Amino acid sequence: MEDIHTVDALLDAAWHSAPVGLGVLKLDGCLQQGNHALLQLLGTPLQVPTLQPLTHWLHPQDQDALAYAMKRARHQHVDIPCGELRIRGAKDIYQWLSTSISGISTNGESVDHFLIRLSPPRSTQERAELVYLLSFALDFTADGALLLDDGLNIRYLNEAATVLMGQARKYLIGQNIGQALAPLALHRDEELQELVRNQLAIQLELSNPTDGTRRHLSVKFTRFHYDRRGYSLALLHDLTEQQRLTETLRHNERQFRALIENTHDAIGRLTPDFRLIYANPALEALCRLPLVEARGRPARDAFGDNSQVDIMADMVREVAQSGTSVEEELIHGIDGPVDKQLHYLVQLVPERDATGEVVSVLSLARDITNIRKAERRLADSNQQLRDLTSRRESAREEERKLIAQEIHDELGQHLTALRMGISMLNLQFGTQAPGLSDAAESLMGLCDRTIQVVRSIATSLRPAVLNMGLYPALEWLINEFRQHTRIACELTTHSEEPALTDDQATTAFRIVQEALNNVARHSGATRTLVSLERIDDTYRLDITDNGRGFDPASVNKRSLGLAGMRERGISLGGEVVIFSHPGQGTTVQATLPIKSAQETS
């Protein structure tokens, strides 16, 4: 027991003899206990415990600092420094005291009291060292700092402030802020005082008097009191580069907006759920609603509800899900007259946020209506040209047919009659006229050769066997090809005589004839196969060889043989395709449509 009393006495003596002011506060801030040093620092008789919180003796501007420190001490079991606070002592004179506070728990759980420590402020030397360190630190900051007195005169400024203001420190010390910062001279003294009192931030443009450069500055005022005197801290932040970047951004945005607003392409922005966010004038002209009403609403409200809008919605959904661009041709006004329809080549591009997620879809639509009209006109012109070519070829074939018949029938008959007449003369007068027999034999040989030439000419104009059908004509052509080229050639058929018109049969014959001529001239083949089969509603004609082959893309565009085969195929409503590769032979494939009238006949 004596030991406990001894310890208590020792602790009580240490408490009261401590050179630092110590006090125990209740949670409401009222002083419950205090040592002698605390009472001497306060310098006023106090009735402990007090009925008023300690903040009653604090300067009004320092009360919040102590209240905030007490709030932190209740949740953090550490010593919370409050800095130097002004406490009213004897004769209502405030003195600066270094203050800290910590929480006390008597039950070992939650904080139920506070321990406050008060000590005299730092010495003049310590303060001078702090001021020097603060001034040294401020000189290394990029922002300018100005300390102003109550009259808004400059009492201190750091190195950055002198650079931003373009004047030496010795010329600025003592100047009024309105004189040092020329743009502030536009404000009356009352307005400037009100500006500082309200601790507002302003932006101004400052011209450097030495080199004439202009800087954009942000000036932020902070008001405070020290030793019953009012001071203001003006922080200068250089916004020149930021302003330049902002102006550049605005300029680029204006240019971009002018480009977007004046382009003929329809440009819009859509959400992944197909809502219209933005539309330039070209796209707004296609909307049923003004952009003010259409923005944010489903795009169907703006563009209508039809098959093209459904395709557009599917495209937007695909881009939002896949994150890749898509392109499609859409028709505006598809439900209206054809001459009023507008064709657009629409490209959708995903727009991503910083995390890479697709947040919107950019729509770029280019009007290709005139291109489609020109293509239709060109197609019509090509079709007319093909029709004209087809009629010309038909007329040529008909003329060949007539000429071949005339040569074969008329000229052939005359030559035959002439030969017979020469033979009769030889029989009647050969014995009577010496040498007549030899002359007659010579003339009959000439007649035979002429008849052969006539037959060759008639056959080359149009083989008579073509009048018997396509199969007999192909067999004759292949037989002639084998005899003249010594290249093996076969004909394979998979159906009966094809139901083709005379023009179709002639065209098919000419295609095979041209293909075999190319085989003989260029392929170096040893074997050729010609096949004709029916597939659904078309006939497919193939001419295949095992020659050296070639690259179709490298063939001269002026090659009339290949072009002629292609045009003949198109004139029949089908096509001619050439498959070839160097060293792998060549296949000429022609497809010929079957007309319903031919099938029913």
Image (cartoon, rainbow, N blue to C red):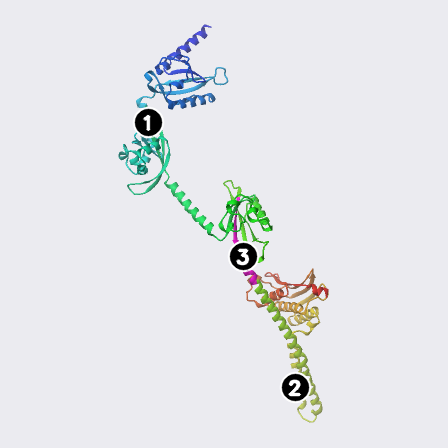
Spatial separation of the CA atoms under disc 1 and disc 2: 143 Å
Q: Is residue 367 magenta?
A: yes
Mark carried by residue 443: 2
Amino acid on which the number 1 mark rests in the picture: Gly
Residues in magenta?
Answer: 360-378
User: What secondary structure is marked by label 2?
Assistant: helix
Find the residue positioned furthest to the bottom: 432
Q: Quadrant of residue 560?
A: bottom right
Q: Earlier in the sequence, mark 3 or mark 1?
A: 1
Q: Quadrant of residue 126?
A: top left
Find the residue positioned furthest to the top: 2
Q: Write down the residue under mark 1.
A: 230
Compare residues 563 and 83 and report the one nearer the observer: 83
User: What secondary structure is marked by label 1?
Assistant: strand
User: How many C-alpha atoms fall within 10 Å of the one at disc 1: few (<14), some, or many (≥20)?
Assistant: some
Q: Residue at x 59, y 65 (%)?
A: 383
Mark 2 vs 3: CB contact within 8 A: no
Q: Is residue 458 visible?
A: no
| Labels 2, 3: front one | 3
**Is 572 above or below relative to 454?**
above
Amino acid on which the number 3 mark rests in the picture: Thr
User: How many C-alpha atoms fall within 10 Å of the one at disc 3: few (<14), some, or many (≥20)?
Assistant: some
Mark carried by residue 132: none
Find the residue positioned furthest to the left: 171
How far from the left and from the top, in percent, is residue 417? 69, 85
Q: Is residue 201 visible?
A: yes
Q: Residue at x 53, y 58 (%)?
A: 370
Compare residues 357 and 31 and report the one nearer the observer: 31
Mark carried by residue 369: 3
Q: Residue at x 47, y 6 (%)?
A: 1
How far from the left and from the top, in percent, is residue 217? 35, 38
Compare residues 519 and 339 and report the one nearer the observer: 339
